[in-house]
Amino acid sequence: MNKKLLTKAAEQGIISNEQVQLLLDFIKAEQTVTSLAENTGEQLKFIRSFGDIFIALGVLLLAFTSNQLAVNTSYQLISIAAFLLIAEWLVGYKRLVLPGITILLSLLYFVNKVADATSSGSDIPILGESLDVFFIIITSLLFYVRYKMPFSLYPVAVGCIYLAIELSGIDIIEYPSVFILLGIAVFMVAMWYDSRDTLRVTSLSDNGFWLHLLAAPLIVHGVMVSLFLSKHSGLQANSLYILLLFVLFFFIALFVDRRAILVSSFAYALYAVFKFAYQQFMQVDNLTLFIFMGVGIFVIFFGTYWYKVRKLIFSPISSLAICKFVPSFGVK
């Protein structure tokens, strides 16, 4: 039912002109309610059909062949211009997400090559060898401003983190806690986006998704490296700390309704489970299989009952002010 059809009905006297707008408002409201009811949290809006995958493969093939032909800066600039035109067609007009991601990655690759060729042998103040990262940030930021594609924020954030570490001169091997601080900063920005779209129906929540995907590994890696470099705790204690950290991350992910947070800490948690289990139950046969079986059951259970567990744990505190910044705890 659209406005043109309702207007035609009004012209034939079936409904009045006043009822046209009322009906349109009613239909729009009902569609919104239906959309919210069907929403199941972290919607990955990458693919609308298999055609998106097909087009994305074509973009990657084009990028590969262009790279083989782009033997100098002039050809690389031509490649950049070509991918900008393709972006205008596929992202600006067609609004395709997965092909848009591959187009942006291709653009960043050629921009990096041009920046390297331009800055080689030159002494540029402040940025120096990081000039290519600066151009990557600018390109990704302009891509976001033009097309509002959430993935664009990921390379922007990665580039800013790299520049912050490079220009500050901090030794991240000696001070891995820097990763924790940067991860918390990215996490706060991600939560800012999430808090503006707790219903997860706009691109703001997609912005938050990509930043969560970056923040979590930064925090986890910083904590893990700090534990491994610590001289005051043994292997068994480290394993226990890693498991406790994974539990903490699980509750945070459950509270903010972002399963993506668990992905980054999962590998470390699996490592800790193996170390801890072999220290305590070395004599058990097929211990590795039992561990993988337990992990599989954990993933299946919480993947299935994520929202029920979330409601059970956090609904008693739903009246707290902090809860208004996250999705409701109702079962979906």
Image (cartoon, rainbow, N blue to C red):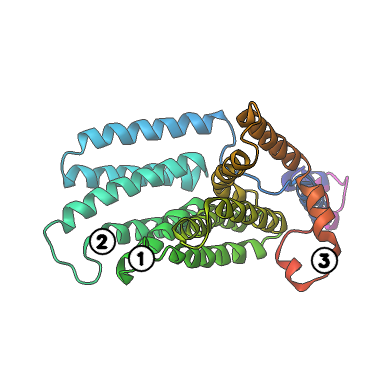
Is residue 224 toward the left or the right of residue 203 in the image?
left
Tell me, yes or no, if residue 196 can be seen here: no
Please tell me which residue lies in front, 127 or 84: 127
Which residue occupies 13% across, 62% down? 122
Residue that mark 3 sits on: 317
Instruction: Where is residue 265? Give x, y as percent.
Output: 57, 49
Q: Which secondary structure lies at badge 1?
A: helix
Marks 2 and 3 sit apart, C-alpha to C-alpha, by 48 Å
Q: Which secondary structure lies at badge 2?
A: helix
Q: Amino acid at mark 1?
A: Ile
The disc at residue 131 is 2
Residue mark closest to the camera, 2 vs 3 = 3
Residue that mark 1 sits on: 165
Residues in magenta, as a range? 10-20
Tell me, yes or no, if residue 206 can be seen here: yes
Q: Which of the two discs, 2 and 1, labels the residue nearer the N terminus?
A: 2
Q: Which of the two discs, 1 and 3, labels the residue nearer the N terminus?
A: 1
Q: Amino acid at mark 2?
A: Leu
Q: Which of the two discs, 2 and 3, labels the residue nearer the N terminus?
A: 2
Instruction: Where is residue 235? Give x, y as percent.
Output: 53, 51
- In the figure, 34 relative to 321: above or below? above
Q: Quadrant of the N terminus?
A: top right
